Amino acid sequence: MRRVVALVCSAALLSGLGACTGELPQVVPMPDGVTLLSDQSRLHRKDREIYIRIQNKSDKPIHIEAFTLMSERITDVKWTGDEEVPAGTEADLEYDMPSAKCGTGFTPTVRLTYRMGNGKRVESDARADDRYGSISHAMDRDCAESTLNEAAKLEVGDPSIVGDGRESVFHLPVTMTPTGKRADVRFGGFGSTVLFNQAEGSPADVDVPLTGSPIKIEMLVTPARCDGHALADDKVGRLFDVKVLGDDVGKNASFYLPLNTPQRVKFFDFYRSHCGLD
């Protein structure tokens, strides 16, 4: 629910001697016991949802009305809502991360608008550190993807299966057509996941310049293990890293190979047939 500041008009306005304005909240230090941090749930690695966690270790409830998050790597994020965090508890304020620029780390400043207990509406500035580096990694994926897309157009073809049963291998054709805009960018290979390993012959660790004629490659994978429970519970098993090498991307930069729904389904169908889980 969006909170609206009430405007109180004085008698002077009625006589034409003044104006009606809303009172701006006072900026004060963050209360003792209230801290902020940034993180992203494992379940949201494929999407853009991240959050600020408000940790309230004070002896009063804190009522959050708004925040503005500022970072050099993304445009400012503005959140409004109605969230009460009782004393001794914590709460997450979710938002969708804007597309990130190339850079290092994530150390945002947050201006929080709130009330402590029955106190007045105030604002405080605080850091919301990326405690596990998960958001920084998400931003690095944005950088890697935008860098590769500047250098080449990536297209994923229709998969096929070669062999039978435990001898079968999943083949996924990928074409990268250089744009001619970047000579420094190279393809570094594909990464494995918790469900699938790169098979022999797959370009897992390479250094291929994205220049000249279209580059046609195949990603080859086999199940990392045959476990029906792992398959049923999986959330990230089809997030294959596309490694990117270039002047303005960090070490081990990568982004997730874009797969459509039919392609993702075929990975699971292969897993079941390879492992005899049908």
Image: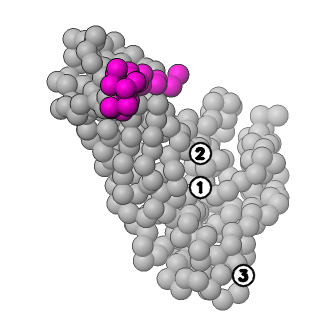
Which contiguous range is marked in magenta? 1-22
The residue most toward the bottom is 212
The relative height of residue 230 versus residue 120 in the rendered view (above or below) is below
Q: Is residue 64 visible?
A: no
Specify the amino acid type for callout 2.
Answer: Lys
Residue matched to label 3? 214
Task: Determine which quarter of the picture holds residue 17.
Answer: top left
Compare marks 2 and 3 and give the one earlier in the sequence.
2
Q: Main secondary structure of the magenta part?
A: loop
Residue 200, position in %: x, y? 63, 64
Q: Secondary structure at mark 1?
A: strand
Figure disc tally: 3
Residue 214 located within the stretch drawn in magenta? no
Residue matched to label 2? 46
Determine whether label 3 and label 1 are within 8 Å by CB.
Answer: no
Q: Nearer the viewer, residue 9 or 118?
A: 9
Residue matched to label 1? 256
Cα–Cα gap, marks 3 and 1: 21 Å
